[in-house]
Amino acid sequence: MNTQYKNVYPFKRIVASIYDSLLLLSVIFVLAYLSVFILNGFNWELPDDPSQPILPGWYAVFLISFSSWGFFSFFWIRGNKTLGMAVWNIEIYSITGNKVTPLQAFKRFCCNIIIVMALGIPLLQIYFTKEKIAFNDMVSGTRLRIN
């Protein structure tokens, strides 16, 4: 049976990303909740000075960065899609035909951060390239398709 795959255009990429961002936010909340509990010595009392942060700034940045990369990498490498991608029948694959590698996932994740910072404008590149691919597809050596 010959299966036809379709390209994924910016609208579906953005909607799936919003869905995944909400799931990721819940993961970050749970990890931060556990971190506050553990770093405060299993003590639920708040600091005396309300202006004092509960978590150190460097730790919060590390927690958000590492958990975000881990969330996307886990799903991209293990099942070729996140939950948001699964809802829209989007799948990620490596152009070599193998599974997505951790390095490819890292490159794609870093490019996605750039795309978010640029308000999604780099996704418009899809309309101007012959292969209908975006910036993150080119850099990471991966592609998205609709099954």
Image (tube, rainbow, N blue to C red):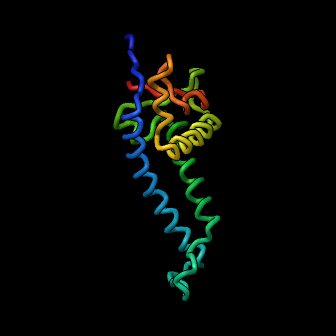
**Outermost residue toward the top?**
1
Image coordinates of residue 62 in percent, x first then y, are: 62, 59
Which quadrant holds residue 100?
Answer: top right
Left or right: where 135 falls relative to 18: right
Q: Is residue 19 above or below residue 1?
A: below
Seen from the viewer's position, the closer of residues 18 and 100 is 18
Q: Position of residue 93 (x, y in %)?
A: 52, 27
Identified at 46% across, 31% down, the residue is 124
Q: Residue furthest bottom?
A: 48
Q: Quadrant of the N terminus?
A: top left
Q: Which quarter of the rendering shows the C terminus?
A: top left
Residue in the image at 55% along x and 78% along y: 42
Residue drawn where x is 51% and y is 84% of the image: 45
Identify which residue, 47 or 44, lies in the foreground: 47
- The quadrant in which residue 101 appears is top right
Percent position of residue 22, x then y: 40, 52
Q: How many labels sit on residues? A: 0
Residue at the image point whose x is 60% and y is 53% from the top = 66
Query: Residue 87: x percent and y percent?
Result: 34, 37
